[in-house]
Amino acid sequence: MNRGIRLNYYRFKPRNYPIITSWLLKYIVEAFTRGLRCFRVTLDLGITYTNICIESLDDVALGDLRINVRDALNIVKDDTVYVLSGNDLIPIKFYDEVLRRFYKLRALGMNIAPTLEINGIHMHRIEGTDPWSDAVIKVRSLGRIVGGKVLDIGTGLGYTAINSLRRGAREVLSIEVDENVLRIASLNPWSKELEHVKIVLGDASKVLTYLSDNEFTHVIHDPPRYELAGELYSLEFYKELYRVLRSGGKLFHYVGKPKQRRARILKGVKERLLRAGFVNVIWVEEALGFRAVRP
């Protein structure tokens, strides 16, 4: 373990704006077309609902702001999540020229937790499930975590970290390498509870070396796919996970379903976990990852 190095803690601050998606706009149009003039809508992707009353699609009050739904439909045409700021519809998507990455907060419905896309690759499971439900399954695979101290590797939009707290974890430390991801999360209503999570900004393979031995009761390792972050699947990294876990502590390691060389990748992950010292390394099909225990 490296000592004397100060970790780069990130202060997460949610930014509250009405959220606009093509699903929401179409819902308003359909309700109005059916003759409804007062009905409930969600301005935070399904977390809460509010009543609205409208007389025309050209001037709809959404909270303290107003929107022309017809005009908005000409702007919000795809699955990008937008925020309504003043009179402007601002897409939560951008290109980082330094990192050469294109980021987008992608809506999956009017009342579903969104996913994050980086260079067109979505960072969550969305086939047959949704990102929030997937996070619930991952955390649940660790069993009882009440009172535990959880290490969450790969903050992303914070769904696993938040669900760890909701299931009773005493403390969650989450590591994220990409500040752009956290900025996007600050605009995502489903990420709001990240303000209760300790977040370290940095490369997990380096941050781990600064953490104390036997510090955590549980670890959730949710890395990008193997082809994008092979170092997070290495024996050296697994040894660090082993070191920071307490005796009897549990690890959940998401692997997913690699499209190429799946059998070999899964076999390699299990073998390296065993070589690192973990026992009871079991594949959890529902969560598409391995559960393991430090003896």
Image (tube, rainbow, N blue to C red):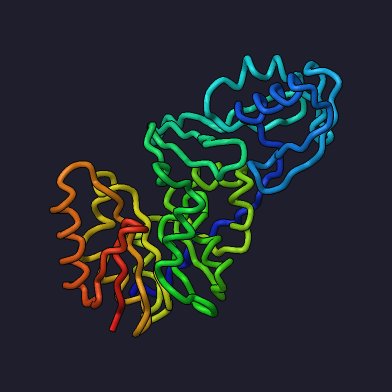
Q: Residue at x 67, y 36 (%)?
A: 19
Q: Position of residue 292 (x, y in %)?
A: 29, 72
Q: Residue at position x 64%, y 27% from top?
A: 90
Q: Quick check: 285 left or right of 12?
A: left
Examine the rendered structure and indicate whether residue 222 appears above or below residue 3. above
Quarter of the figure with residue 58:
top right
The quadrant in which residue 27 appears is top right
The answer to whether residue 112 is left or right of residue 214 is right
Horizontal and vertical percent position of residue 118: 41, 37
Q: Position of residue 55 (x, y in %)?
A: 86, 20
Residue 123 x/y as whole percent:
41, 44
| In the depicted structure, whether residue 51 falls above or below residue 276 | above
- Tell me the residue at 47%/55% (across/down): 155
Note whether 22 is above or below 199 in the view shown.
above
Dividing the picture into quadrants, the one containing residue 1 is bottom left
Q: Is residue 223 left or right of residue 7?
A: left
- Please name the residue shown 58% across and 66% down the image: 166
